[in-house]
Amino acid sequence: NAGVMQNPRHLVRRRGQEARLRCSPMKGHSHVYWYRQLPEEGLKFMVYLQKENIIDESGMPKERFSAEFPKEGPSILRIQQVVRGDSAAYFCASSPSGADTQYFGPGTRLTVL
Amino acid sequence: GQQLNQSPQSMFIQEGEDVSMNCTSSSIFNTWLWYKQDPGEGPVLLIALYKAGELTSNGRLTAQFGITRKDSFLNISASIPSDVGIYFCAGRRTDSNYQLIWGAGTKLIIKP
């Protein structure tokens, strides 16, 4: 039973480009969460999605950031027109229901030059 | 946003020593979780606590859910080199059944 998968593991973008981060939840999990982690800090909640629905996006910046979890395929976190301050590790977690334990993927480390 | 107060920030210990770290919050939590994160990896769940006063062990690790529901501690007994890493506490407030609030982490370093 494969765990949560994220790709790419490392992503380098120049300022102004777009970054697309993918997350495939564990088999049987329909709830996905995205977190952001800066060096030497804990994780910060960004967005919570179920299949085809955004449940809570209160932690996600209103501009340039968007997330989706389509009926088929992985969840995508999209950052448009990236800036240096977007450099961070982005983690995805999944759970079978909203109140269950969240299992984390290995993260995508985004570096904006 | 709210963050838990986790201490200490880092610990330098000798192999074989016991380790203790804790988290406190100004809000009441209904769940406390302890995760370990190795460099370049995602957090891995160590122990989950769901009731005030609950004391749970996982091998050499023991964690407790504080009676006030505003704190938790994690103990590691007889530390070994593979215990090195960053330990995070995370909690769920009573007004949210999914959103996790995270501490800033305790970095455990074992002196050679």
Image: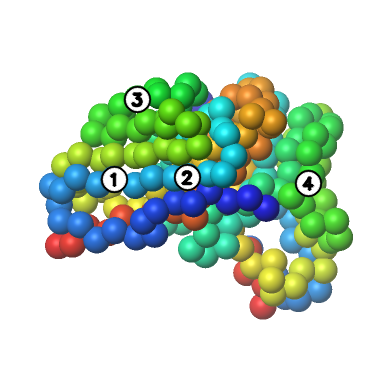
* Same-subunit check for callouts 2 and 1: yes
Residue at 82% of width from left, 51% of height from top? A66
Residue at 74% of width from left, 61% of height from top? A19
Q: Callout 3 environment at 10 Å: few (<14), some (14 to 19), or many (20+)?
A: some
Seen as rendered, the residue at the extreme right is A63
Q: Is residue A68 left or right of residue A86?
A: right
How far apart marks 2 and 1 lie (CA) works out to: 14 Å
* Same-subunit check for callouts 3 and 4: no
Q: Nearer the viewer, residue B51 or A55?
A: B51
How far apart marks 1 and 4 lie (CA) works out to: 33 Å
Q: Is residue B90 left or right of residue B14?
A: right
Rendered image quadrant of residue B100? top right
The label on residue A58 is 4
- Asked if the residue at tag 1 contacts the one at tag 3, i.e. Cβ–Cβ closer than 8 Å, the answer is no
How far apart marks 3 and 1 lie (CA) works out to: 15 Å
Q: Is residue B111 left or right of residue A106?
A: left
**Residue type at numbered disc 3:** Thr
The chain identifier of the residue carrying mark 3 reads B
Q: Nearer the viewer, mark 1 or mark 4?
A: 1
* Same-subunit check for callouts 1 and 4: no
Question: Where residue A61 appears, x then y in whole percent?
Answer: 79, 57
How far apart marks 3 and 2 lie (CA) works out to: 18 Å
Q: Nearer the viewer, mark 2 or mark 1?
A: 2
Residue at 84% of width from left, 32% of height from top? A52
Question: Badge 3 is on which residue?
Answer: B56
Question: Badge 2 is on which residue?
Answer: B24
**Residue type at numbered disc 2:** Thr
